Amino acid sequence: MTATSTDPSVFSVQANHPALPGHFPGNPVVPGVLILEYVLRAYEALQSCPTPLRRLTDVKFLQPLRPGETADIAFDVKSGKVTFSVVRGGTLIAKGAFELGGGTAS
């Protein structure tokens, strides 16, 4: 995984990432599960601790993310539920929420 800056909420997936071959040949798209991994890692980095994830909810992938494109992740935390959005160049490409286990979010 490659962060494009020291900000963990900004990322770009390079064309040589091992998840890209076969997803899809001739028309590469970053797999949604990889985007979710960036979301969770960014949240952990911002909290400076591991995230006790209970479950993901309401996840929607609205637009594709292509290799080399930069995306930004934003979070909103309320009562142990974290909502997130992933934006590429002003366009919302993914959104959803996750619930934290073992306590509440800070």
Image (cartoon, rainbow, N blue to C red):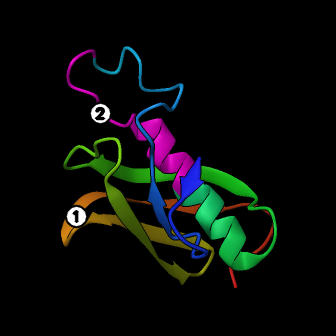
**Can you tell which quarter of the image residue 48 is in?**
bottom right
Q: Is mark 2 on a helix, strand or loop?
A: loop
Residue at x 51% of width, y 32% of height: 17
Q: How crowded is mark 1: few (under 14 residues within 10 Å), some or many (20 or more)?
A: some
Q: Mark 1 sits on what residue?
A: 92
Query: Is 101 placed left or right of 73 in the picture?
Result: right
Count all numbered tags in the image, as a single digit: 2
Which residues make up the magenta segment?
25-38
Q: Decide if residue 93 is in sight here.
A: yes
The quarter of the picture where the C terminus appears is bottom right
Q: Does the magenta stretch include residue 27?
A: yes
The vertical placement of 31 against 61, above or below, is above
Residue placed most toward the observer, 58 or 91:
91
Query: Is 52 placed left or right of 19 in the picture?
Result: right
Residue at x 60% of width, y 57% of height: 40
Residue 53 in picture, x, y percent from top left: 68, 55
Kind of residue at disc 1: Leu
Q: What element carries label 1?
A: strand
Numbered label attached to residue 52: none
Residue 37 in picture, x, y percent from top left: 57, 47
Residue at x 34% of width, y 21% of height: 23
Q: Mark 2 sits on what residue?
A: 29
**Can you tell which quarter of the image residue 98 is in?**
bottom right
- Name the mark nearer the viewer: 2 or 1: 2
Label 2 to label 1: alpha-carbon separation: 16 Å
Kind of residue at disc 2: Val
Residue placed most toward the observer, 67 or 78:
67
